[in-house]
Image: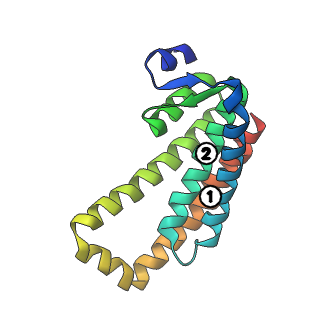
Amino acid sequence: MELDYFIKKGLANKIFETELQRYTDFFANSYKENLEHCKFVLNTFPRWSIISGYYAMHDITKLFLVKKFQIKIDAKVHKTVIKIMETITKDKETLKLLKIGYEEFTKMAADLVEAKGHRQKAQYYTGSEFMKEKYRETAGDFLKNTVLPYLEKIKNL
């Protein structure tokens, strides 16, 4: 599968030269802000730390795609980014980290959807020191073992 496949399917587009600087500036700042937010809320709001950590990974990947291939993602953004990375990189470790990040993000999103339907569970989470600690551990591991190594690997690509 080549990059043209994603363009033909309407999932990605070549970026116009006039948009290039705006996109690179946005994603360069966005991934750094998400990383800082991930670290800042790690102990107080660990679930949001995981979400922010994933978005740091996601945004630096979009920055990489813009800089290296001059493409932007237009549809099914999260899955399309992963599929494109599967197409262009042979570094299995980088792909593994990105997929772990996406899985953690989708777990958090699922928790939020479930909490919407089951408010009592959400209240139980906020009142349970055990669950807060469990999320803190998960968020800390995610930052250390997934987010930071991924950011370094993508910077090296």
Count residues near mark 1 (Cα–Cα under 10 Å), then give few for <14, some for 14-19, many for 20+.
many
Instruction: Say above or below: 32 vs 133.
Output: above
Instruction: Say above or below: 131 vs 105.
Output: below
> Which quarter of the image is occupied by the C terminus?
top right
Mark 1 vs mark 2, CA separation in Å: 9 Å
Q: Nearer the viewer, residue 117 or 88?
A: 117
Residue 50: image location, x then y, percent: 52, 61
Q: Residue at x 47, y 14 (%)?
A: 8
Q: Is residue 107 visible?
A: yes
Q: Residue at x 56, y 51 (%)?
A: 55
* Residue holding disc 1: 34
* Residue holding disc 2: 59
Under mark 1, the amino acid is Asn
Q: Residue at x 31, y 74 (%)?
A: 122
- Is label 1 in contact with label 2 (beta carbons under 8 Å)? yes
Under mark 2, the amino acid is Asp
